[in-house]
Amino acid sequence: MASKTQMTQSKDALAMAADTQKPRQLKYVWDFQDRIFRGVMRGAGSSVLVIMALVGLFLTLRASEALGSVGFSFFTTQAWEPDSGNFGIAAVLAGTVIIAIIAIFVAVPFSLGTALYISEYAPRRIKRLLITLVDLMAAIPSVVFGLWGFFFLQNQVTPVAKWLSQNFGWIPFLSVQGSDPSDPLTSNTVFTSSSLIAGIVVGLMITPIVTSVMREVFSQAPIGEREAALGLGSTRWGMVKNVVLSFGKGGIIGATMLGLGRALGETIAVYMIISPVFVVQPRILENGANSVSSLIALRYGEATQMGMSALMAAGLALFIMTLIVNFAASSIVARSRSGASS
């Protein structure tokens, strides 16, 4: 009997211990102010989704006439002649992607270096000034970048583009038709208004945004891991490489994709620089480029009913592509250590 009693008591003790190990269910009583705040925040968040859905619905309805007229060939046709029924976004979509990729190759190295310097190396007395300057760069209007790119940067990039064509023209995307590398008197106009120049300008435009996101992610790297790396004898760069960059890897990818989404939709700066062509132009040094947003800006004022529907279809394609890129960036950031901690 005594042994049975002891066994019963031990089982009760184990049951009580198991109950104490379970997390307690905390109940929060929402007062009137909390309910109002929660309702306002939910309404604000929901309104963003509703507005995006309405924009997509509006573009779909306005584009239905053009899409119904040409069907899937809208995505494979290079010409843009809506009134004759021969139109598509193959050329402008390729140009949009090319300019955006060039912009990313320009922006990411500058952004990564600037963000690391501000968060890890800049003296405390100038760190706030540098953050303010980067944020102010993001506020510069795109038309200013366009004017600067057209009147100043183009003249500086043209000799470099000519040199690249002469020495690396055997690479397909660096070749230039109509230019003789052995002729020093070749006109420079064939190198102006190119995808390279537009990509550089857009890359400088998105650099502040990408820099801000990366800097914020780097600043969240755990202080304990930083101190542990330094305490074990690591150099400053070793700590940055193994702790900060490892922690912020998802943030770097997410910031890059957010910058890509911004570059895909840039309008005025690209419109002011490029010389529109409606053929797929993979040669980035050569005159002639195009993008979806600049096409809309170029043809909006003179569009007929079918032309307007075709422009709306182009805008719908750009809208969907930008959404996909931004959602992918958000997903990558959320799955990373930096995104989970924030």
Image (cartoon, rainbow, N blue to C red):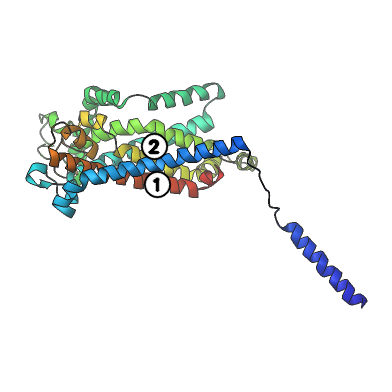
Q: For the point 43% across and 45% down, which residue is it?
A: 330
The mark that comes first in sequence, 1 or 2, is: 2
> Mark 2: which secondary structure?
helix
Q: For the point 84% across and 68% down, which residue is it?
A: 10
Q: Could you say which quadrant of the image residue 3 lies in?
A: bottom right
The label shown at residue 109 is 2
User: Picture coordinates of residue 190 (x, y %)?
Assistant: 13, 33
Left/right placement of residue 281 relative to residue 222 reads left
Viewer-proximal residue, 54 or 285?
A: 54
Left/right placement of residue 247 relative to residue 143 reads right
Tag 2: amino acid: Pro
**Label 1, label 2: how far apart the Cα atoms are:** 23 Å
Tag 1: amino acid: Phe
Viewer-proximal residue, 32 or 307?
A: 32
Left/right placement of residue 75 relative to residue 227 reads left
Of marks 1 and 2, the one in the foreground: 1
